[in-house]
Amino acid sequence: MFHSVAVYTKGMQALYLKYFKDRHLELNTDHRDVDFYCKHLQRYDVQLKMAERLPESQRLGMFLIDLTPYKEYVRQCSVDSLQQLQLELNADVVHRTRLLIEKLNDLHTTLESHPTTLVPLFKRLTALDSYNQILQNVENSDISQIGALYSVIDRFDVPHTEVDRRAFESTHYLITSARHVAEACLPDREGVVDAIDKCLARDVRYLYVQVKRVVRPLVEAEVLLDGKSDHEEIWKQLVKTEDVVRTYVTMANFVREVQRYLGMPNTRFTELFNLSSRYVNTRNLWLLMADWDIKLEKWKNQSFQTLDIQEINSYTFKYMEACDKLERLLPKNTVISVFEEKRRGRGESLF
């Protein structure tokens, strides 16, 4: 047993020197160090209790260190560390809660003026879910450090006042209260999800109707496929169609994003996206024609001696390849018919 007491004394002195050699140093409350610290204290406590069972003559008390300053330092470090941690957690949670309340108030005001708008409903849902995520992160990371320091205080009977104890437990109460608030919001979340479900059904029907009434007529407008149409008129039509198509494609993508967030099957807006691709290809057709016109005017104004025949052949080959690709993407013969009409309108050969 003397050997056990000697091992205990040596280990306790090493631990004391490691953590308390400089009384002005703060105790490191990193989660990993706290675990290491508590495990060593518990092991040395068992050895001390074994030594206390020996008769007085066998205890070798002269080799045992005085634990009074050690306990006092643990108490002070625990109080300082927990109070600092509590202040940081309180400030962070209070700040986030205040921001959340402000956002919810703004969203509530928006919902009162637009009770069936999908966007603010979705923002409100994500705000409620982010609040739960904040609570979960705080509970999983920071609260574990407080629990480890509680273990030190209770295990070694570190003296502390009732005021200190209340300070230690305030963060637990704060998180518990916040969790109750989050649980109380669950019915509200279910109501928001129900409202979003109704809005989704409404918006899907609306998009289907608008594709038939608005998007398709714009994309398939005859002016876009008329080679003799005025360039300015075509440009205005392209800009107008671009704004409309982009608006409805953005709306459809948002509807699918909300559906994915809620784990619902994605609505397939096949016709809308096909028309969107059709519009892009039509725009590329007119950009290609404009580029071709610029090249023709440049070559016409050059003398034959300065013309680069190899450059003209290379560009013509690329141009014909682009026409072939567009013809596969646009309705049959669209590209050829447009360029033929353009050629007849100008009274010149295409190539």
Image (cartoon, rainbow, N blue to C red):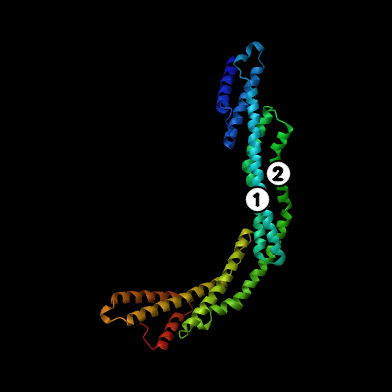
Q: State the image coordinates of residue 266 (x, y, percent, origin top left).
A: 60, 64
Visible in this render: residue 6? Answer: yes
Q: Answer whether residue 270 is visible to the viewer in this image.
A: no
Q: Position of residue 171 (x, y in %)?
A: 69, 41
How many numbered discs sit on the rendered protein? 2
Q: To which residue does mark 1 refer?
A: 96
309 lies left or right of 275: left
Name which quarter of the figure residue 261 lies in.
bottom right
As drawn, which residue projects farthest toward the front? 24
Q: Which dot marks residue 214?
A: none
In the rendered structure, find residue 174 and report the number of the disc placed on it: 2
Q: Which one is nearer the viewer's eye here, 194 or 32?
A: 32
Q: Secondary structure at mark 2?
A: helix
Q: Amino acid at mark 1?
A: Arg
Specify whether 196 is left or right of 349.
Answer: right
- Residue 13: x and y in percent read 57, 22
Q: Position of residue 289 (x, y in %)?
A: 42, 79
Work out which quarter of the rendered image holds the C terminus and state it. Answer: bottom left
N-terminal-most mark, 1 or 2: 1
Q: Check the image and report above or below for 272 versus 152.
A: below
Instruction: Locate the N terminus by quadrant.
Output: top right
- SS label for mark 1: helix
Q: Amino acid at mark 2?
A: Leu
Q: Are marks 1 and 2 in contact (CB under 8 Å)?
A: no
